Image (cartoon, helix red, strand yellow):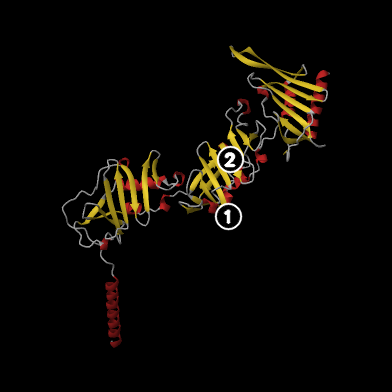
Amino acid sequence: MRKGYQWIGLSLCLILLIGVYWYINRPESSPEPEATAERDLDFWDFTEEDISQLVLIGSQNIALEQTEAGWQVAGLDPELTNHSQVSTVVRRFATLEADFVLETEPDDLSKYGLAKPSVTVKAELADGSEKVVYLGNRHPTEYLFYLMVEGDAAVYAVNGMYGTAFQSTLENFRKRELGSFNLADLNRLVIHNSGQERIEIAAAEDPAENLKGLDRLRFISPYRTPLRIAALENYAKFTLDGGLFLSLRVKDFIDLNPEDLAQYGLDQPQGELLIEDRASSIHLLLGYERNDLEVYAMLAGGSEVFSIYKNLIRIRDADPFEWLIKVLYMVSIDDVNRVDVTWDDQHYVLTMEREEIVVEEDGEPKTEIKESFYLNGIRAEERIFRRTYGTIVGLTVDAVLDQIPDEVGEPEFKLVFYHEDPERLPVTIELLPYSRDLYATRIEGVVEFVIARDKVESVKQHLTTTLAELEQ
């Protein structure tokens, strides 16, 4: 019995100790709203469009400015700005309202964090007036912030979404995604690395309808030969997932307002990358390597220095010859009416004649194009003629000349393409002696590539054999 009383006594002592501990460590009660006359908890009646500038003054001073191009953050490159976050902050200010009033005439602002506000928000309105709010502490248990409005002594509790928006830093307004670009839908691509030739590819202004888009992209450089067509088909070498889209992203923001770009290698950029598809574009200037994985960069026309992973921009290491459509001249048979082929004392002429004829289809007259094909004046079956034409236009270059010779000999093989469109001038291709195994190509007067002699010998043999068969 005595032991039972001892256990009861110990239990009571334990309960007493727990009670004392709770009392000492109990949470401070938050200020309760005063019982006041009903107040309007909407602070003002204007819209985002009525605000000219919004300044957040806290650990950083950040000015949001309304411009002709929309809301911008002063000092940030527009392309590196999270415009969604900017719009959110401006909208929060325009729609600011309180949940309730805590005190109408507070004696001690420090308990609300308003003796020294964490953030002051100033709005300049289009009519020249100014609105100012002061943000205090966050409510200890609820998603609320304490807030005061200039000209009003009362302390209000506002929804946490307002306080969170007003506490935004530059990091919140920055956008790391630079864009995602469809390599199969390019309009323009520029790659330039220090000490290397500039690569530039652009969409053709006058692609041939009969080539069905095969000539959509053309080289501006490094090739001087006109009518050089590009095809970027090795996407997997340049994209992280092996797909069509090249996605670029900032790794770290380095310097918002650099005083000396030379330390980053951007006073005289070490490289340049411009990518434009039909939806968007970006123009990067590239500087020194930051480390083994990153390189310094900035936007052309921008001011901020950031870093980007080198593996995201490995397209800058591309070999343009891999993108070159290597045929001597890409032209559809439907766009030419004659091809002259000459070597030594041999001369071959491929001729295509076309005329409109009227035929009857389902009892109705219909206009068609009737084609006739000739090799040296001898009529040829369409199948045989097209195969011969394909053999000629299928000639492809094998390499770029390392050094263009000062003097070249007379052409040993010559092609001249005459077009169906009378306004298009003929295109002349000449093959010049270069070595025992190679010809140098002269296309429209430009010497730049070489082609294997055995390819040309195959064309000669094909023409000789085909004509002999037609003459039988």
Location of residue 227 (image quadrant): top right
Pick the residue in front: 365 or 410. 410
Query: How many other residues sit within 10 Å of disc 1, few (<14), some (14-19) or many (≥20)?
Result: few
Q: Which residue lies at the image location 32% right of the left edge and 54% below the top edge?
A: 163
Location of residue 226 (image quadrant): top right
Residue at mark 1 to residue at mark 2: CA–CA distance:
22 Å
Query: How many other residues sit within 10 Å of disc 2, few (<14), some (14-19) or many (≥20)?
Result: some
Q: Is residue 242 above or below residue 398?
A: below
The residue furthest left is 37
Asked if residue 128 can be seen in this view, the reply is yes
Query: Which residue position holds label 1?
Result: 293
Q: Nearer the viewer, mark 1 or mark 2?
A: 2
| Left or right of residue 151, residue 261 in this image | right
- Quarter of the image for the C terminus: give it: top right
Q: Which residue lies at the image location 55% right of the left edge and 41% below the top edge?
A: 274
Dot 1 falls on a residue whose secondary structure is loop
Q: What amino acid type should be assigned to the residue bearing mark 2?
A: Val
| Left or right of residue 257, residue 390 in this image | right
Q: Is residue 127 above or below residue 132?
A: above
Which numbered disc flags the more N-terminal residue, 1 or 2?
2
- Badge number at residue 190: 2
Q: Which residue lies at the image location 35% right of the left edge and 54% below the top edge?
A: 167
The residue furthest bottom is 2
Q: What amino acid type should be assigned to the residue bearing mark 1?
A: Leu
Q: Is residue 99 above or below residue 387?
A: below
| Left or right of residue 336, residue 280 in this image | left
